[in-house]
Image (tube, rainbow, N blue to C red):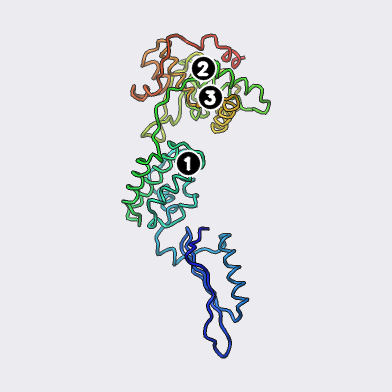
Amino acid sequence: MADDCSNEPFISARAPKDGLPRYCAQIRRKTEDGPINVSKTFSSLANAKKWRDDTLARMQLGQIAPRQEETSKLGPRVCDLIQKRMDKGRSVGKSATQNLDFLIKHDRCKVSASTIDLKWFQDIAEDLLKLEMLPQTAATYMTMLSSSLKWAAERDEDVPYGVIIRAMNVLWHDEILARSEARDRRPTLDELDKIFDAMLSNKRQKIPVITISVFAIFSCRRLSEICRLRWSDLNVADRKILVRDMKHPRKKKGNDVWVKLPPQAMKIILSMPKTSEFIFPYNPRSVGTAFRRHRQRVGIDDLRFHDLRHEGISRLFEKGKRDHFVMQTSGHQSRDCLDRYVNIEKKGDKFKKWHWLDWVLE
């Protein structure tokens, strides 16, 4: 609980009544939930000091909250407005919901929305970066926070709209936040050998990360999409599969797309045991964490699981496939979006007779 150190607790002696002395102990504090003003009068100085010390300790533990009539004067809290936007505004995807839930629980969002200023925005951004988020990831959280507050302000909630605009401009201009950049990172066969060998040597690794990684390359799929693929959506005859809720800049839900499965991807699917309605019944976060952990273990820098999708798309172009074929496989609906994934190095197929594909199929 944040204290305002300029308001120290004090005990004042009052004029005695009926010949008895009176000592009034008073504590004033500004907290993130609102101001707290408490006082009590005692007949002895010792009792006044004990009450003061006990009350300060309870404040530090968060056991004393501002009175409702005090907080209500300041208007709704930031966390309440975010929740209101989630309840009444346009529905958002699973990832966005998780981000907003994180902000609702953040201590700095428990303040009155009418009191936020530039420093408040800067403090939240710095908090996110201290969690080892990339500036691009922090920008996603801050953009969602600002859009939620603007949503509330446009509906006559007591939110300083101008502060939101100015604060976000400052965060961008000062490069505290950053926009995602197109990546050209592609794994080498030697790097994949090192990562997969490290996984094989780890007896505690139960998730088939190697299989999922190899499938990501040959299918050109995102990790989250791989873990959502269903047996019921597989069309073996036409060698295609339905990808549910495929990522789209505007459609957050219901963007179900049929994509082509290259022969290697189809073989991997058919080699999987049917233990669930999902073909790869694993948590994508756990898969991504395992990939990152083993990559770090062998000292490979700046390689992400998502780069395997880049590798798969670039591979198709290097094999001489045309735009239409690649887009049917990747699921892209425009060449502009596809171009971000294309980093052609040389013609041919560097994965021809790749031993890891044989290992996965065996």
Q: CA distance from mark 1 to mark 2?
A: 30 Å
Q: Dot 1: what SS?
A: helix
Point 45% across, 29% down: residue: 244
Left or right placement of residue 89 versus residue 33 in this view: left
Does the residue at mark 1 contact the one at mark 2 (Cβ under 8 Å)?
Answer: no
Q: Dot 2: what SS?
A: loop
When the figure is inspected, residue 281 is found, relative to residue 42, above or below; the finding is above
For residue 188, the mark is: 2
When asked about the image quadrant of residue 157, the answer is bottom left
Which-is-in-front pick, marks 1 and 3? 1
146 and 277: which is toward the camera: 146
Q: Which amino acid, by three-letter code, is at mark 3?
A: Trp
When the figure is inspected, residue 95 is found, relative to residue 27, above or below; the finding is above
Does the residue at mark 2 contact the one at mark 3 (Cβ under 8 Å)?
Answer: no
Residue 131, position as x, y percentages in the image: 51, 41
- Give the crowd class for mark 3: few <14, some 14-19, many >=20 residues within 10 Å: some
First along the sequence among labels 1 and 3: 1
Point 49% across, 49% down: residue: 106
Which residue position is annotated with label 1?
129
Residue 85, position as x, y percentages in the image: 40, 48
Residue at the extreme right of the image, as rendered: 203
- Give the crowd class for mark 2: few <14, some 14-19, many >=20 residues within 10 Å: few
For residue 147, the mark is: none
Q: CA distance from mark 1 to mark 3?
A: 40 Å
Which residue position is annotated with label 3?
231
First along the sequence among labels 2 and 3: 2
